[in-house]
Image: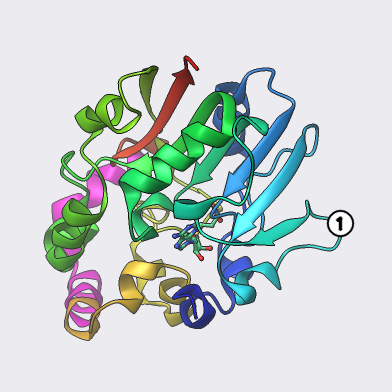
Amino acid sequence: MSDYDSIGRGYAGQRRPDPRIATRLAAAMGNVRTVLNVGAGAGSYEPSDRHVVALEPSRVMIAQRAPGAAPAVQGVAEALPFANRAFDAALAVLTLHHWADRVRGLAECARVARERVVLLTFDAQAGGFWLVRDYFPEFMELDRRQFPPIADYAKLFGGHARVEVETVPIPRDCVDGFLGAYWARPEAYLDPAVRAGISSFARSDTRAGVERLRADLASGEWNERHGELLTKGELDIGYRLVVATLAH
Ligand SMILES: C[S@@+](CC[C@H](N)C(=O)[O-])C[C@H]1O[C@@H](n2cnc3c(N)ncnc32)[C@H](O)[C@@H]1O
């Protein structure tokens, strides 16, 4: 059984693709025609104008794919059931940190992609944002263990790829409810339904941090410390687009 068979219930309700992030991913894919979406979940960010196959380990996630979504194959990144260079591109959106063996999974992506691998991931060395710094430092610890340092990607792709990394600032009204989506809407993190769509909250007992945030919002302490953020339209909180152009 995959982790997301338990933590993924209700995922599609909280995690809808954000159109601004979708635009960035579409640009990163360039003019490729065939795409393998690895760790595809419920199908967010799957382009409708290219031929897509989805790869996903969790039956619960596959069941949340929309009718008419790309065909989904059950499997894991570490053992992709496809021939070498079967697709123009491999895409992996906010999934790499869940893989049991990231080195193997990335090597598999590079094996099945002819042209490029596109990842939306997170730079855990970038310092995070107020939520993790002030209330859930345990998430930062876990992120540092789970997300490869950005400088390691060239090596992870075996030295045969040109690797480009771009910052993905998160809009203040981001509609994809991942961990950093609500940086300008702090009350959202008090909502159990919002937290249920974010895997970091499923991994430890976060009640104390939630109660501290609730108290700081009520007392005005949060506003005192972070209120100036509310004037910003978007914020770099560590999300990164990694594009590896392969040289097979
Ligand atoms: C946060 S969700 C992201 C889903 C989707 N890419 C999106 O953007 O909504 C992470 C996904 O990675 C999947 N996953 C976990 N381990 C995996 C593995 N070893 N190989 C491929 N996918 C995996 C989970 O089942 C889950 O669907």
Local SS, label 1? loop
- The magenta region covers 211-231
- Using the image, determine if residue 37 lies above or below residue 202: above
User: What residue appears at the point 50 percent right and 30 percent down from the top-left corner?
Assistant: 117
Query: Is 140 in front, or is 243?
Result: 243
Q: Amino acid at mark 1?
A: Gly
Query: Residue 95: x and y, percent?
Result: 44, 53
Query: Residue 56: x and y, percent?
Result: 59, 60
Whether residue 134 appears in magenta in the rendering, the answer is: no
- Magenta span: predominant SS is helix
Query: Residue 108: x and y, percent?
Result: 47, 41
- Using the image, determine if residue 45 lies above or below residue 199: above
Query: Is 134 in front, or is 15?
Result: 15
Query: Is 141 in front, or is 211?
Result: 141
Q: Is residue 60 left or right of residue 142?
A: right
Query: Residue 226: x and y, percent?
Result: 20, 51
User: What residue appears at the point 67 percent right and 36 percent down from the top-left corner?
Assistant: 35
Q: Residue furthest front?
A: 83
User: What residue appears at the point 20 percent right and 38 percent down from the top-left corner?
Assistant: 149
